[in-house]
Amino acid sequence: MKTELEIQKQLEADDLKYIWHPFAQMREYSRETPLVIEAGDGCLLKDIYGNEYIDGVSSLWTNVHGHRKKELDEALVEQLSRIAHSTLLGLSNVPAIRLAKKLIELAPPGLTRVFYSDNGSTSVEIALKMAFQYHQQADGGDPRKTKFITLKNAYHGDTIGSVSLGGMDLFHATYKPLLFPTIQVESPYCYRCPCGKNRSSCNYECFSQLEETIIRHAPETAAFVIEPLVQGAAGILLQPPGYLKKARELCTKHNIFLIADEVAVGFGKTGSMFACDQEEVTPDIMAVAKGIAGGYLPLAATLTTEEVYAGFLGEAAENKTFFHGHTFTGNPLACATALASIKLFASEKILEGLQVKIRQLTAALEPFIALSHVGDVRQRGIMVGIELVEDRKIKASYAPEVRIGHKVIKEARKHGVIIRPLGDVIVLMPPLSITTDQLDRLCAVTYEAIRLVTEG
Ligand SMILES: *Cc1c(COP(=O)(O)O)cnc(C)c1O
C-alpha cells in the first residue's frame, strides 16, 4: 500500500513525465513542482494536499458561477441520465435545440442562427469560413471579397485560421509561412498609443486609422474581426468608448461583415452579457466559447444573421452547403450545462449583482498605480490587466528572461491565490460569483505579490 504522500508525489512525477503542457516552456515548467488540482468549490481550487486557492482567473476565463455549482452539477447529471453524446450531423438533440433558442433570445438583436463547435478557435474559424464562403456564393456576395482586416495584438485562437487573424508576434510569428495574410490595423492600446498620443492629446486617431484602412480595402475585404471592447490575450487592452460602434458603422457603410470574437468577453465579463451590448452593436457573426457552459465543458457557438444564413441555401447540387462540422458539435452534456448556466444569469440576477463587485474591484485596484513598477492598471468589468514595467518614466518593459509576471504569480500562489500572467501583465478575472471577501483577498494578495517581487 502506498502512503498518501507517495501517491501525491507520484502524481507530480507523472505530470512531468507524461504531460506536455499548453503554452509552457516545458524545461522551465519541469524545474518547479507542479501544482495539481484535485477539487474545487465555489471560487476556490483545492490541490492534492488540500491547500485552497482563490481561482483568480476563473480557470482560464471560463468559470462563471464557481466550481461545483449545484444547478450546473444537477443539469449535467440529469442529462447524463438521458444521453451523453449523439451527433448533430444529420440528427438533432434536445439540449442543443433549447440552448440555441436561448442564445438567440439573449444575443444582440438580428442574430438568428447558431452554429455549434467546441472551442473558441473553432468558433472563429467557422466565422471566417462563413464570411468567406458567403461572398463566394451568395446572391448578395462579392467573390472579390476574400480578405480580412484584423487588429494588431489580436488573439483569436491557436488553429491555423484563427492564428492567421492573430497579431501577437510572440505566439504567431513562427507560423507565418503557414498563414494567410490579413490587413492589419494598429490596435487601440492607450498606454502605448501606436499613434503617439496621450490622454490629453488624443483625438481618436485610431478611429480614423481604422476608417482609412476600411475605405482603402473594402472592395477586397470580407470582414473586420475584433475582440469587442477588450483585447484579452494581448494583455487586457481596452478600446476607447465608441470604437466598437464606429467599427460597426464603418463596416455597414462599406459593406464588410463585422465579426465579433466574444470568446473572452462574453457571458458577463465586461459587466454586460455580451460586450457588444454595451455599444448596442449587432455583429454579422459572433463567436462565443470560454464561459458559455459556465466553465464546465468545452462548447462554442458561432451566431449569425438571417442574411448570412440565407447565402448558404440552395439545392444540394449547387454546393452552397457549409461543409464544416466537428465530431462533438452540439454535445448534449455541454449544451445542457450551458442552458443551466444561462438560466442562472436571470434567476440569480448575476449581472445586476455584478455591478457592485465591479465597483469594489475598481476601488481595490486604486492603490496599485502607486507601486513603483506598475505602469498601467486596466479594468473593464471583471477583467483586469496590471502592466508591470522596469522603468515607469519611459515605460520600459522588463527583459523577458526576468519572467517578472511569472515571479509575481508564484508569490501570489504562496498566499493562496492562483492567477496567470500574460507576459508582464498580471491578469485578474475571477468568476462572476466571487464573494466580496474573496475579491478583497485576491486584490490584497496580488498587491503584496507585486510589491514584494518588484520592490523587494
Ligand atoms: C481564448 C480565446 C480564443 C480561443 O479559444 P480556445 O477555446 O482556447 O480555442 C479565441 N478568441 C479569444 C478572444 C480568446 O480569448
Image: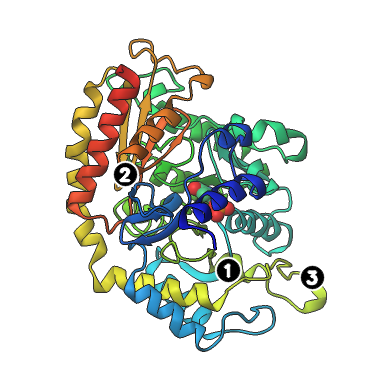
- 103 vs 43, left or right, is right
- 65 vs 338, left or right, is left
Q: Quadrant of the N terminus?
A: bottom right
Q: Is residue 398 above or below residue 287?
A: above
Q: Find numbered disc 1 in the image and state the secondary structure of the residue it sits on.
A: strand
Which of labels 1 and 2 is toward the front? 2
- How far is mark 2 from mark 3, CA to CA? 56 Å
Horizontal and vertical percent position of residue 328:
63, 71
Q: Find numbered disc 2 in the image and state the secondary structure of the residue it sits on.
A: loop
Q: What amino acid does circle 1 point to? A: Tyr
Foreground residue, 409 or 266?
409
Residue at screen point 44% across, 21% down: 195
Q: Which mark is on residue 128?
A: none
The quadrant holding residue 242 is top left
- Which is more N-terminal, label 1 or label 3? 1
- Which is more N-terminal, label 3 or label 2? 3
Foreground residue, 217 or 170?
170
Residue 80 visible from this viewpoint: yes
Label 3 sits on residue? 319
Q: What amino acid does circle 3 point to? A: Asn
Disc 1 packing (10 Å; few <14; some 14–19; many ≥20): many
Ligand 1 lies under 8 Å from the Cβ of mark 1: no
Which of labels 3 and 1 is toward the front? 1
Label 2 sits on residue? 416
Label 1 sits on residue? 116
- How far is mark 1 from mark 2, CA to CA? 37 Å
Q: Is residue 327 above or below residue 223?
A: below
Q: Quadrant of the C terminus?
A: top left
Residue 202 visible from this viewpoint: no
Horizontal and vertical percent position of residue 127:
60, 57
- How far is mark 3 from mark 1, CA to CA? 21 Å
